[in-house]
Image (cartoon, rainbow, N blue to C red):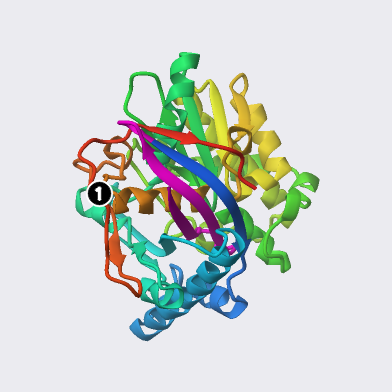
């Protein structure tokens, strides 16, 4: 078994997700993953404020970008040290960091570039372990969107269930942006961003000084503004065909311009409905039979209730029930991607990202010792078995 630590900070910038896992290739085509534990560590408040201030449509200088890259790298290094000690029993063979996305450059439906902050040298220096990072850029260079990379995990993880069921299963991630992976029997996986999940909700909550609307407590008291909902649903992004990806470059503060007269509870209720409708429309378009949700949005019961209502008769469940903690799934994804790169196994899903073919992802920053990679695998892996239950 290779012990891997996965790190990521999502588009919501809530904190650094950390997960530890033991991984190995079993047989000819399967990866076995044993979850050892996951947690979320807060970003330093000053750093988080600076990151949010650097997002579009605001401008960011080269000096600020350099300082943020260093600051995120140092924060991730501290998170890695904590994760090794608290989750991995003091030992890790490899660390993988998906970093903090600060800009995702999409024009006319094509991704032209993507930038993740968090200089991996700080992680390698603090831990002494090799670090796989910058995983999205190679897929983008191959004509893909570099997102959602979770399609590779979902396809391997849910393919057997979908085959047994005879119907499509869909993995749903509710981070700042919502994305789905469609896993249908006999078909290559399809994954794409459906639109906002928590990104706009958090912006609305900040109007009353809140970091987020915990448990949907404000949204549940609001009333859906139908006229506003119709205007938001007219965004052409929702009708664009996949592959496609988006982020806070599109769904930023100015997106809610003209809603100042709407009460915050009503705005939140409307944005919950926006996410539920756009996610459900995407899932229904692919004949969803079961939807497996993960991400921070799972903690919002108002959003989950709206999703369940709009997805019916498809069943909505969470990744926890299949062995991957909903809060830690993306950090486990990071661990898996790093392990695949370490083993010389392509880790993108071209049918999901739009890349021209399978690619090894990322770059490797050595630890304190010379790099000694295992012999590269010559055959692809197609299945993921999650063994045991994460905590």
SS label for mark 1: loop
Which residue is tagged 1? 344
Question: Quick check: can you spot residue 8?
Answer: yes
Image coords of residue 95 (percent x, y): 42, 61
Question: Quick check: can you spot residue 263?
Answer: no
Total marks in image? 1
Residue at image position (32%, 39%) is 243
Residue at image position (35%, 43%) is 244
Image coords of residue 306 (percent x, y): 67, 35
First to last magenta residue range:
1-30
Residue 362 lies in quadrant = bottom left
Q: Is the magenta stretch mostly helix, strand or loop?
A: strand
**In front: 381, or 286?**
381
The residue most toward the bottom is: 63
Image coords of residue 103 (percent x, y): 38, 64
**In front: 372, or 110?**
372
**In front: 120, or 254?**
120
Image coords of residue 79 (percent x, y): 54, 69
Residue 19 among magenta residues: yes
Residue at image position (26%, 36%) is 380
Q: Is residue 159 above or below residue 345?
A: above
Badge 1, how many Cα within 10 Å: few under 14, some, many 20+?
A: many
Residue at image position (54%, 50%) is 175
Residue 292 among magenta residues: no
Q: Is residue 237 above or below residue 282?
A: below
- Is residue 348 shown left or right of residue 23? left
């Amino acid at each position: 078994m290779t012990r891997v630590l996965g790190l990521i900070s999502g588009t919501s910038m809530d904190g650094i997700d950390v997960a530890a896992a033991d991984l190995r290739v079993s047989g000819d085509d399967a990866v076995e993953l044993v979850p050892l534990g996951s947690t979320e560590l807060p970003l330093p408040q000053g750093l988080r404020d600076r990151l949010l201030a650097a997002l579009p449509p605001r401008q960011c200088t080269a000096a600020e970008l350099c300082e943020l890259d260093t600051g995120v790298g140092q924060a991730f290094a501290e998170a890695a040290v904590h994760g090794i000690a608290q989750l991995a029993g003091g030992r890790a063979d490899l660390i993988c960091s998906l970093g903090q996305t600060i800009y995702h450059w999409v024009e006319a439906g094509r991704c032209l570039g993507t930038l993740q902050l968090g200089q991996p040298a700080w992680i390698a220096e603090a831990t002494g372990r090799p670090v796989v990072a910058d995983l999205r850029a190679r897929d983008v260079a191959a004509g893909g969107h570099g997102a959602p990379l979770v399609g590779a995990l979902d396809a391997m993880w849910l393919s057997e269930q979908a085959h047994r069921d005879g119907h499509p299963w869909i993995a749903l991630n509710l981070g700042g942006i919502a994305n789905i992976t469609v896993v249908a029997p006999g078909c290559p996986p399809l994954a794409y961003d459906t639109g906002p999940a928590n990104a706009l909700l958090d912006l609305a909550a900040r109007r009353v000084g809140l970091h987020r609307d915990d448990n949907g407590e404000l949204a549940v008291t609001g009333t859906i503004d139908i006229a506003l909902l119709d205007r938001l649903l007219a965004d052409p992004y929702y009708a664009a065909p996949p592959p496609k990806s988006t982020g806070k470059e599109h769904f930023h503060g100015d997106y809610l311009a003209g809603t100042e007269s709407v009460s915050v509870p009503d705005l939140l209720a409307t944005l919950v409905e926006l996410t539920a409708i756009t996610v459900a429309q995407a899932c229904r378009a692919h004949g969803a039979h079961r939807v497996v949700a993960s991400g921070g949005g799972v903690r919002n019961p108002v959003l989950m209730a709206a999703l369940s209502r709009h997805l019916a008769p498809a069943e909505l469940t969470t990744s926890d029930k299949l062995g991957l903690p909903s809060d830690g799934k993306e950090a486990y994804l990071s661990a898996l991607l790093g392990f695949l790169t370490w083993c010389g196994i392509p880790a993108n899903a071209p049918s999901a990202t739009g890349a021209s073919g399978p690619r090894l992802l990322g770059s490797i920053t050595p630890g304190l010792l010379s790099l000694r990679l295992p012999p590269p695998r010559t055959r692809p892996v197609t299945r993921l078995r999650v063994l045991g239950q994460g905590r």
